[in-house]
């Protein structure tokens, strides 16, 4: 019997890792579940460090120079592979056909590697797992389930539909953000040019008159002088360093968790983030359940699709309770992160045995609510930025025009 390397959470929520001896991967998960462990990752152990099939895996550094496969190209790849499989072609032939029809060099390179690995004896899920930048854990797990059930063509169709929905949401967000961000960006650039290059000359001319300058003008001149001083340069350097540090900190586990918690507490934005996560949870869990993947394994996959580490941590706690035999709905209710409607749907699905159908129907509803929530965010946030920008521009105009207007109104007798 083979050995399986695994990572899991104990009933107390602590992490553990090790190797277990079992005849198959599902049996290994069952044995760990009986021990009270929630499996988060499991694969064949390999003493040589090769891939799970015994073949050498592609070193990570070799992927650096490879062209990136765009989300839209990935959706097209999944759709073409679905059509080829449904047409009755075997997997290797289907991959070769998709490679020949691909327009993108990156896709041809990716599919070519998948085909080579399958020809060498790997399963499609193992080949996909060797490309973590192109295929998610959910896609790999669902493909593995399709191979086990002999329904790979249907699974590929579900993956293509799921990827298309996710792409549509991302493109809607991007489209809604382009115009406001363009306006804000151009405004900030314009303000920078005016404050650093144009205003100093105007202020020098006004200052030469010797007249008392209005308060906004004096404040602005002081700010401009400070920006040109060594202290201003030092502050700019410190601000840049702080920004770089903040970005790097946000990419750490602690920073990501803190930032995601802050997102959930932010008005309007928190509502949108939560609805996106809930919609993904419902659709992913429903798709995995319909694919025949056990609920314990599904929870480990779903947590990585939420897009929010704070909610994922709460889901891990719920999963630990599910391992002990608790109801899915009850455990989700205790997290306080999921809406009552979803919890009631899951409770009904557990009672009727139609969890996958009810989750998919609920996911459609949440997709619509998610689109509306995102639209509100992309409407309100840019307006706030533009309003702040307008106030700043108004202050600059007032500071520049007030002394000029005073000089004009005073007339030649002054």
Image: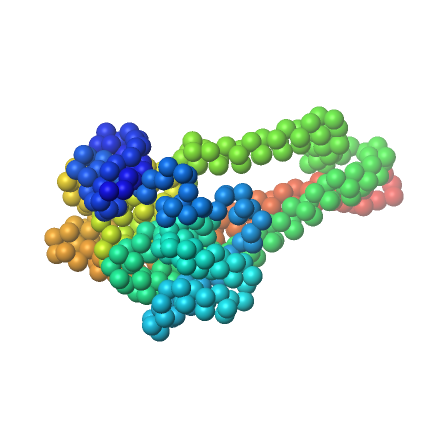
Q: Residue furthest left?
A: 351
Q: Residue furthest right?
A: 412
User: Which image quadrant is residue 224 in?
Assistant: top right
Residue in the picture at 57% in, 44% down: 388
Residue 372: x and y, percent?
39, 57
Classify 95 as above or below 404: below
Is 244 positioned to the left or the right of 268 in the image? right
Residue in the picture at 15% in, 40% down: 326
**Which of these two is toward me, 266 or 398?**
266
Residue in the picture at 19% in, 42% down: 30
Residue 250: x and y, percent?
48, 35
Quadrant holding the N terminus: top left
Tell me, yes or no, if residue 27 can be seen here: yes
Residue in the picture at 16% in, 43% down: 327
Residue 314: x and y, percent?
29, 38
**Which of these two is toward me, 85 or 212?**
85
Tell me, yes or no, if residue 287 can be seen here: no
Q: Residue furthest bottom?
A: 87
User: Which image quadrant is residue 21 in?
Assistant: top left
Residue 43: x and y, percent?
32, 43
Is 175 positioned to the left or the right of 15 in the image? right
Quadrant holding the C terminus: top right
Number of marks in the rendered image: 0
């Amino acid at each position: 019997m083979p050995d399986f390397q695994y990572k899991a959470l104990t009933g107390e929520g602590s992490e553990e890792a090790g190797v277990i001896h079992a005849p198959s991967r599902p049996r290994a998960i069952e044995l760990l579940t009986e021990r009270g462990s929630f499996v988060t990752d499991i694969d064949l152990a390999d003493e040589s460090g090769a891939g799970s099939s015994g073949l050498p895996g592609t070193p990570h550094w070799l992927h650096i120079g490879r062209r990136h496969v765009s989300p839209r190209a990935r959706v097209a790849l999944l759709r073409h592979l679905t059509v080829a499989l449904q047409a009755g072609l075997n997997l290797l032939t289907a991959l070769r056909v998709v490679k020949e029809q691909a327009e993108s060099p990156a896709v041809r390179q990716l599919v070519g590697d998948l085909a080579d690995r399958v020809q060498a004896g790997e399963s499609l899920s193992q080949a996909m797992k060797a490309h973590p930048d192109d295929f998610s854990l959910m896609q790999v797990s669902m493909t593995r389930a399709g191979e086990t059930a002999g329904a790979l063509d249907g699974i590929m169709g579900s993956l293509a539909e799921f990827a298309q929905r996710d792409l549509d949401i991302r493109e809607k967000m991007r489209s809604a953000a382009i115009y406001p961000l363009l306006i804000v960006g151009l405004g900030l650039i314009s303000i920078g040019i005016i404050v650093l290059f144009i205003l100093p000359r105007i202020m020098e001319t006004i200052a030469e008159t010797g007249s008392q300058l209005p308060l906004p003008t004096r404040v602005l001149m002081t700010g401009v002088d400070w920006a040109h001083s060594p202290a201003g340069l030092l502050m700019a350097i410190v601000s840049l360093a702080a920004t770089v540090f903040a970005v790097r900190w946000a990419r750490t586990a602690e920073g990501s968790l803190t930032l995601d918690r802050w997102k959930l507490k932010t008005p309007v934005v928190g509502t949108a983030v939560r609805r996106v996560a809930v919609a993904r949870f419902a659709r992913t869990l429903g798709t995995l359940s319909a694919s025949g993947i056990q609920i314990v394994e599904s929870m480990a996959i779903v947590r990585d699709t939420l897009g929010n580490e704070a909610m994922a941590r709460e889901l891990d706690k719920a999963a630990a309770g599910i391992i002990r035999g608790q109801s899915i709905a009850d455990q989700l209710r205790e997290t306080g992160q999921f809406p009552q409607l979803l919890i009631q749907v899951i409770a009904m699905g557990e009672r009727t045995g139609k969890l996958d159908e009810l989750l998919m129907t609920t996911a459609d509803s949440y997709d619509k609510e998610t689109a509306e929530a995102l639209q509100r965010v992309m409407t309100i946030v840019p307006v706030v930025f533009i309003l702040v920008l307008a106030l700043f521009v108004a202050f600059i105009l007032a500071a520049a025009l007030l002394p000029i207007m005073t000089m004009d109104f005073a007339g030649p007798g002054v």
